[in-house]
Image (spheres, rainbow, N blue to C red):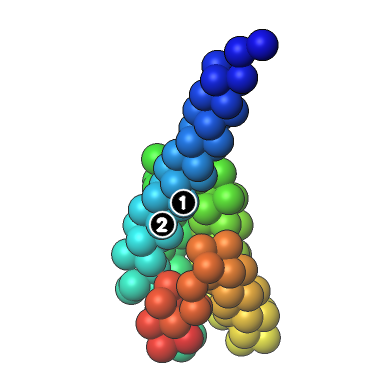
C-alpha cells in the first residue's frame, strides 16, 4: 500500500481548488473595479441626464465582452439595458417613465454591488 501518492494527489487537488478560487476572486475584484470606474460618471446618485445615461449604457455595452467574471458580466449587461431604458425614457420627456427607469437602474446598480460584495456607494458614489 502506497498512501503517499494518494495524499499528494489529494493535496494537489485541494491546492488547485484553492488557487482556482483565488483566481476567480481576483478576476471578480478586477471586473468590479472596472465596473465602478465605468459607473463613476453615470449620474445615478441623482436623475441622470439623457446624455449621461446614453454614455454610461454605451460604455457598459462596450465593456461587457471584456469582463472575465460571468457574474459581473451579467450584472453589467443588466445595468446597461436599464440605462438604455432610462435614456429612452428621458428622450420621451415622460417624467413618470424617467423616475421608474431611474429606480430600475439604481436597483440594478444595487444588485451589481451585491454581486461584487461591496456597498452600492462604492460602485456609484453618492447612492
Residue drawn at x 61%, y 13% is: 2
Rate crowding at label 1 as few (under 14), some (14 to 19) or many (20 or more) other CA atoms within 10 Å. Answer: some
Q: Examine the rendering and report whether any part of residue 94 can be seen.
A: no
Indicate the quadrant where residue 102 lies. Answer: bottom right
Residue drawn at x 51%, y 63% is: 116
Q: Examine the rendering and report whether any part of residue 62 can be seen.
A: yes
Left or right of 76 on screen, residue 37: left
Residue 93, x across and y down, in percent: 56, 80
The residue lying toward the viewer, choosing from 107 and 14, is 14
Residue 123, x across and y down, in percent: 43, 73
Residue closest to the far front: 1
The residue lying toward the viewer, choosing from 55 and 12, is 12
Residue denoted by label 1: 25
Indicate the quadrant where residue 3 lies. Answer: top right
Badge 2 element: helix
Residue 72, x across and y down, in percent: 52, 53
Residue denoted by label 2: 29
- Asked if 47 appears above or below 21 in the picture, the reply is below
Amino acid at each position: 500500500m502506497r498512501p503517499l501518492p494518494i495524499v499528494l494527489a489529494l493535496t494537489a487537488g485541494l491546492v488547485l481548488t484553492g488557487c482556482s478560487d483565488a483566481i476567480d476572486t481576483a478576476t471578480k475584484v478586477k471586473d468590479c473595479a472596472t465596473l465602478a470606474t465605468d459607473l463613476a460618471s453615470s449620474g445615478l446618485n441623482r436623475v441622470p441626464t439623457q446624455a449621461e445615461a446614453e454614455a454610461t449604457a454605451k460604455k457598459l455595452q462596450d465593456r461587457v465582452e471584456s469582463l472575465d467574471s460571468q457574474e459581473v458580466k451579467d450584472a453589467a449587461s443588466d445595468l446597461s439595458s436599464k440605462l438604455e431604458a432610462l435614456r429612452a425614457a428621458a428622450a420621451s420627456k415622460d417624467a413618470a417613465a424617467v423616475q421608474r427607469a431611474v429606480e430600475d437602474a439604481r436597483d440594478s446598480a444595487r444588485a451589481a454591488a451585491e454581486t461584487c460584495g461591496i456597498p452600492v456607494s462604492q460602485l456609484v458614489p453618492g447612492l
